[in-house]
Amino acid sequence: MDFKTEPIIDVREAGIFQGLDAVLTNVNFDIQKKEFVFLIGRTGSGKSSLLKTLYADLPLRMGHVEVVGFDLGKIKNKDIPFLRRKLGIVFQDFQLFSDRSVAENLFFVMKATGWRDKGKMKSRMAEVLMLVGLADAATKMPHQLSGGEQQRVVIARALINSPDILLADEPTGNLDPDVADGVFKLFQEINKQGTAILMATHNHDLLRKYPYRVLKCEKGQLLDSKTADISINTSF
């Protein structure tokens, strides 16, 4: 079966709003299984608002958006947790509980998304920590980890429920270049294993080095490198 027949994200004639203000209009794109897509644009151009709309943190006010089978124009509040179980969300500022160990941070998310069997929880936690290269970090506190290691914990947390796609908002923005490159390679490995990636970034070097598809927020519009010539050399 051709995976392109069933996009993970399908956006048609959508408006992306912050409050009553439209930040993007007539947005059209889809993302297929196993794709890796960059999202770029100047600060304030709508990148974060688009991502927040995709995981239902901002309401969809205009157009059609379907994410992992959920119609965001019709989704009810009680169903939003089920949407997010099928997504992995990675933030720039980590958002780890500073007073809880790595294991406790992961268990918190697992309990919140319906896990109950402690044995299965421990097994899955070990799997994701192994995947991100932190097999021995379960008992450590966040302050005992480097910035790159903390970001790997955040990625592990996002992978807990085997999501169809990871939405990443500037995941390497606060990291040194060498550390950022290692984290990016981890995203590539996750992508090779079948998880789609939509990554917002300001990192020009990544864009030049890795020729993935690009979506660019610019002047209230979303440009797609599949259908438009997008410059990555201008400031964003």
Image (spheres, rainbow, N blue to C red):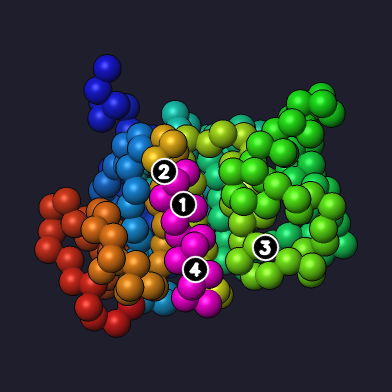
Name which residue lies at 83% across and 48% down. 104
**Badge 1 density bin: few <14, some 14–19, many ≥20, Cα 10 Å:** many
Q: CA distance from mark 2 to mark 3?
A: 20 Å
Q: Are marks 1 and 2 in contact (CB under 8 Å)?
A: yes
| In front of the other: 107 or 124 | 124
Q: Is residue 151 left or right of residue 169?
A: right
Q: In what element is the residue under mark 4?
A: helix
Which residue is denoted by mark 2 in the rendering?
191
Indicate the quadrant where residue 43 lies. Answer: bottom left
Q: CA distance from mark 4 to mark 3?
A: 12 Å
Most extreme residue toward the right is 99
| In front of the other: 130 or 67 | 130
Upstream in the sequence, badge 1 or badge 3? 3
Name which residue lies at 49% across and 62% down. 182
Tell me, yes or no, whether the highlighted magenta stretch contains residue 139: no
Magenta part of the protein: which range?
A: 176-190
Upstream in the sequence, badge 4 or badge 2? 4
**Badge 4 density bin: few <14, some 14–19, many ≥20, Cα 10 Å:** many
Upstream in the sequence, badge 1 or badge 4? 4
Q: Where 204 falls versus 130 (above or below)? A: below
Q: Which mark is residue 14?
A: none
Picture quarter with the N terminus: top left
Amino acid, disc 3: Gln
Which residue is denoted by mark 1 in the rendering?
187
Which residue is denoted by mark 3 in the rendering?
150
Name which residue lies at 44% across and 46% down. 189
Which residue is denoted by mark 4 in the rendering?
180
Q: Where 118 falls versus 36 (above or below)? A: above
Name which residue lies at 76% across and 26% down. 120
Q: CA distance from mark 4 to mark 2?
A: 17 Å
Q: CA distance from mark 1 to mark 4?
A: 11 Å
